[in-house]
Image: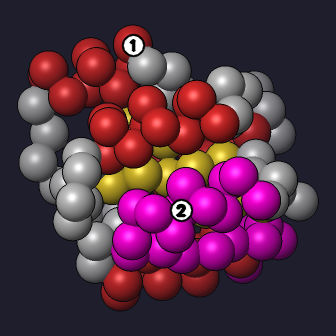
């Protein structure tokens, strides 16, 4: 299936997403540090990045900008427990395909992941 990267400042949240998506056959890696995620994209094929908007050193929107410089074709889903219209608009402007709210709804995560990857149009 797909190679997916999850970046969340809360490790348990990333692990939860990893478990859900691995059950669907995807390969998933989880990061809590933005620099590690950037290095991973530089050195590995990543089909989809799931980015939390609230991270440790930068926002998910800033990280999205950095990842786009490395891989302009990277598919991205933004994740947040603190939704705002400005953040949603900025994320979509920078090329995020979808926007997910916490707490994670398993069915919504699965559907939006498959849709973004083109597995379920």
User: Magenta region: which residues?
Assistant: 23-43
Q: Is residue 60 above or below residue 8?
A: above
118 above or below 93?
A: below
- Coloration mode: secondary structure
Q: Callout 2: few (<14), some (14-19), or many (20+) C-alpha neighbours within 10 Å?
A: many
Residue 68: numbered disc? none
In percent of width and height, residue 1 lies at 89, 59
Tag 1 and tag 2, C-beta contact below 8 Å: no
Q: In this view, does 12 lie above or below 26?
A: below
User: Would residue 87 appear left or right of 75 to someone viewing this image?
Assistant: left
Q: Which residue is at the front of the view, 33 or 86?
A: 33
Residue tagged by mark 2?
37
Give residue 49's position: percent from left, percent from top: 58, 50
Q: Is residue 32 magenta?
A: yes
Q: What element carries label 1?
A: helix
Q: Residue 93 carries which label?
A: 1
| Real-space Cα separation, disc 1 to disc 2, in angstroms | 21 Å
Left or right placement of residue 66 versus residue 74 in this view: left
Residue at image point 77% right, 59% down: 43
Q: Would residue 100 be visible to someone looking at this image? A: no
Of the numbered discs 1 and 2, the one sitting upstream in the chain is: 2
């Amino acid at each position: 299936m797909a190679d997916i990267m999850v970046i969340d400042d809360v490790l348990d949240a990333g692990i939860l997403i990893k478990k859900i998506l691995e059950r669907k056959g995807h390969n998933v890696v989880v990061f809590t540090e933005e620099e590690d995620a950037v290095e991973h994209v530089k050195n590995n094929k990543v089909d989809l990045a799931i980015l939390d908007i609230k991270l440790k050193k930068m926002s998910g929107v800033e990280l999205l900008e950095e990842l786009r410089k490395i891989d302009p074709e990277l598919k991205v889903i933004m994740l947040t427990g603190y939704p705002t219209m400005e953040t949603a608009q900025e994320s979509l402007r920078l090329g995020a395909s979808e926007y997910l709210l916490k707490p994670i709804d398993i069915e919504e995560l699965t559907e939006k992941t498959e849709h973004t990857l083109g597995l379920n149009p």
